[in-house]
Image: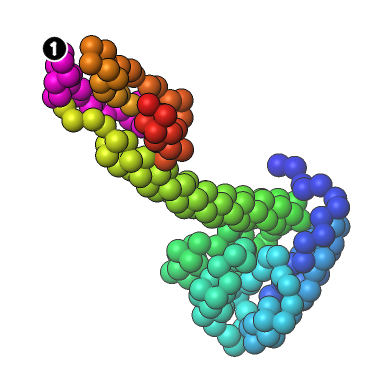
Amino acid sequence: MGAPLIGHCEHLLIVNDDPESQELIVNCLQTGGYETTLVSDIPAALTYIQKNHVDLVILDLGIEDSDPLKMLKELCSTYSDLPVIVLSHRSTAEQTAEALQLNVMDYLRKPFNPEMVLFSVCNSLKRMNLMLENRKYRDRLKVANRELQRRLEEVQADQQAGKLVQQRMLPVSPYRLMNYKFSHRIIPADYLSGDYVEYHQVSDNKLVFFLVDVTGHGASSAFVTVMMNQLS
């Protein structure tokens, strides 16, 4: 088990009233390059968190004359992005189970060695950073999906407008000119292509029949067929 690299600048709040544990935790964390603040009771911890930036809390469940689990519940509900590591050797099995159900990052039993504390802090911070990055990624994905849906609706509206323009320009079918009978059939494609058909008589013994295929989709291609219709 390796200790984390020196050079971290995260701010850790230690909530502990045991002088021996206080000294051990503070020394090992400062050796690991972390900035630490030590408080010995629950009210001081809550006040500090409200007024200062904290990256991680190390909470001793064995604090005398207090209810650490109550603080833990408040932390997890109010500061869901704040990772918490709990410590204790005096807590009951019920306390431990309840603490773990609150999604704390880690649980360390006393006595513990400095290497274990450093490893737990480093691992908890990394996990929280990954969770925050995943949340940001999901938020960006939601925004991208909303933009994609908006653009899709615009394309669909554009295609529908182009389709209506083209349908209104199409000649009667079936239709007789001289000794010829003309008819056409529309087969919808996945994307509107701007296809257009026309036939009309130009003299007593001549008629014109042509097909137009316009590259593109939607209203813009339909406008080209309008121009072709006018020219014809």
Q: Relative to 143, is 223 on the left or the right? A: left
Q: Above or below — where is 122 with respect to 225?
A: below
Report the front residue among 22 and 175.
Answer: 175
Crowding near pointer 1: few (<14 within 10 Å), some, many (20+)? Answer: few
| Residue at screen point 85% across, 50% down | 6
> Residue 192: in sight, yes or no?
yes
x 67%, y 51%: residue: 126
Residue in front for this viewpoint, 118 or 140: 140
- Where residue 188 sits, quadrant-wise, is top left
How many labels sit on residues? 1
Q: In which quarter of the image is the N terminus?
A: top right
Measured as percent of width and height from the top left, residue 208 is found at: 30, 17
Q: Would you say residue 45 sits in the magenta stretch?
A: no
Q: What stretch is highlighted in magenta?
A: 174-195
| Residue at which label 1 appears | 179
* Residue 41 falls left or right of residue 98: right
Q: Is residue 52 left or right of residue 207?
A: right
- SS at circle 1: loop
Taking the spot 23% from the left edge, 27% from the top edge, the residue there is: 186
Residue 229's quadrant in the figure?
top left
Instruction: Considering the whole magenta stretch, tell me its main secondary structure.
Output: loop
Give the answer, above or below, for where 171 lies relative to 61. above
- The image quarter containing residue 114 is bottom right
At 48% from the left edge and 70% from the top edge, which residue is drawn? 95
What amino acid does circle 1 point to? Asn
Is residue 191 one of those drawn in magenta? yes
Image position of 34 with respect to 39: above or below = above
Residue 82 drawn above or below residue 202: below
Foreground residue among 183 and 207: 207
